[in-house]
Amino acid sequence: MTITAAADGSALGNPGPAGWAWVIDDQMWAAGGWKHATNNQGELKAVLELFRATAHVDDDLLVLCDSQYVINSITSWMPGWKKKGWRKSDGKPVLNLELLQELDAAIAGRRYRFEWVRGHVGHPLNEAADFRARSVAEAYQRGAAIPSGPGYPGSLAGNTVSASDHAPGGTGTGAAPGGSRTASASLF
């Protein structure tokens, strides 16, 4: 079986209040974010949390993603960065290193593929992930409850906060343990 999911990130001001989300359907999704982060950090975190949430199943994973940066980072650039001590071809350190190293560990041994989808053109799963990621960013901006979602059945990742939910530089937090939930209209 193949699990098909969309993953997306959102940052207001980029950097600014930021959110991430992955969506399989209305009953299986998760979201979180930070008070201050970049869009790329949100995009990477969404994919990372999707891999973590599905780590306990042996299904293939099809990740629908509108970020060429994320897709290229994982499928093309990462092996070279690792060989160069996590440095780019110009010798400068790779940005978002912690998230990329966590992703490198999360994808090890997994069967997955990425499919690029154009953002903001009505793709149902991508729009659902975008809506939820943006909702988190807006909640941080307003100081409101952070919508975290039900997660994936049987997942150990669940809705708990891990050290990696804190934005680079130690600012912001993910959703509170157990997750705050807000109602949202179905997007499917």
Image: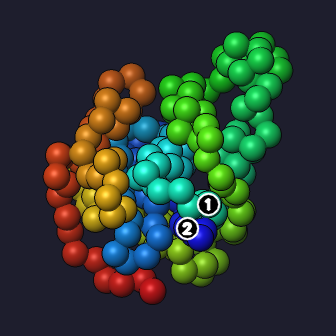
Crowding near the residue tagged with mark 1, few <14, some 14–19, many ≥20 C-alpha atoms within 10 Å: some
Crowding near the residue tagged with mark 2, few <14, some 14–19, many ≥20 C-alpha atoms within 10 Å: some
Amino acid under disc 2: Ile
Q: Secondary structure at mark 2?
A: strand
Q: Secondary structure at mark 1?
A: strand
The one of 106 and 131 positioned closer to us in this rendering: 106
Q: Are marks 1 and 2 in contact (CB under 8 Å)?
A: yes
Asked if residue 3 is positioned above or below residue 83 in the image, the reply reads: below
Name the mark on residue 60. Answer: 1
Amino acid under disc 1: Asp
Q: Quadrant of the C terminus?
A: bottom left
- The image shows residue 138 at horizontal and vertical percentages of 32, 58
Q: Is residue 99 left or right of residue 175?
A: right
Name the mark on residue 3. Answer: 2
Q: Quadrant of the N terminus?
A: bottom right
Name the mark on residue 83. Answer: none
Task: Looking at this view, name the residue that lies furthest to the right.
Answer: 89
Q: Is residue 188 left or right of residue 100?
A: left
The one of 142 and 34 positioned closer to us in this rendering: 34
Residue at the (47%, 56%) spot, across then down: 57
Q: Is residue 4 left or right of residue 82?
A: left
Asked if residue 34 is positioned above or below residue 26 in the image, the reply reads: above
- The image shows residue 36 at horizontal and vertical percentages of 37, 38
- The image shows residue 44 at horizontal and vertical percentages of 54, 44
Q: Indicate which disc, 1 or 2, sits on the residue closer to the N terminus.
A: 2
Q: Looking at the image, how many numbered discs can be counted on the residues?
A: 2
Q: Inspect this view and state whether residue 31 appears.
A: yes
- The image shows residue 56 at horizontal and vertical percentages of 43, 51
Task: Looking at this view, name the residue that lies furthest to the front.
Answer: 58
